Image (cartoon, rainbow, N blue to C red):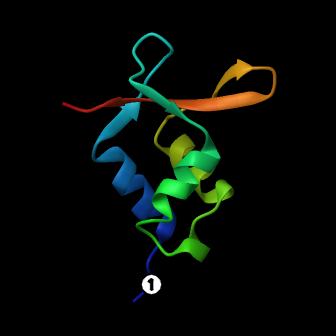
């Protein structure tokens, strides 16, 4: 059985969260933060920055620049 880890990451994120802007955000995370959290669920060697960037952009998230060259993803919980 082949597991597409990008699709699995997208599923895990999209079940509970949706993109937000600076006003509606409930929290923000860097790509590295998200990788660390998902490595607790998915196999560590299958999750990297590139996979998370692709998964989030597929879900219509856009990284926001907090300060020069410091980017974060903004999230809000789905209700």
Asked if residue 6 shows in the view, the reply is yes
Point 48% across, 17% down: residue:
21
Point 28% across, 47% down: residue:
15
Q: Does residue 58 appear left or right of residue 68 in this picture?
A: left
The image position of residue 22, as x and y in percent, is: 51, 14
- Element type at mark 1: loop
Asked if residue 62 shows in the view, the reply is no
The crowding category of the residue bearing disc 1, from other C-alpha atoms within 10 Å (few below 14, some 14 to 19, many at least 20), is: few
Foreground of the two, 19 or 25: 25
Q: Furthest residue to the top?
A: 23
Q: Name the image quarter holding residue 25.
A: top left
Note whether 78 is above or below 48 in the view shown.
above
Point 80% across, 28% down: residue:
69
Note whether 9 is above or below 53 in the view shown.
below
The image position of residue 55, as x and y in percent, is: 53, 51
Point 61% across, 39% down: residue:
30
Q: Which residue is mark 1?
A: 2
The image position of residue 1, as x and y in percent, is: 39, 89
Note whether 19 is above or below 47 in the view shown.
above
Foreground of the two, 30 or 57: 30
């Amino acid at each position: 059985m082949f597991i597409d880890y990008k699709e699995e990451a997208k599923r895990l994120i999209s079940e509970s969260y949706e993109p937000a802007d600076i006003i509606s955000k409930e929290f923000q995370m860097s790509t590295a933060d998200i990788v660390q959290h998902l490595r607790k669920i998915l196999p560590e060697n299958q999750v990297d920055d590139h996979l998370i960037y692709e998964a989030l952009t597929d879900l219509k998230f856009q990284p926001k620049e907090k300060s020069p060259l410091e980017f974060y993803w903004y999230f809000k919980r789905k209700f």
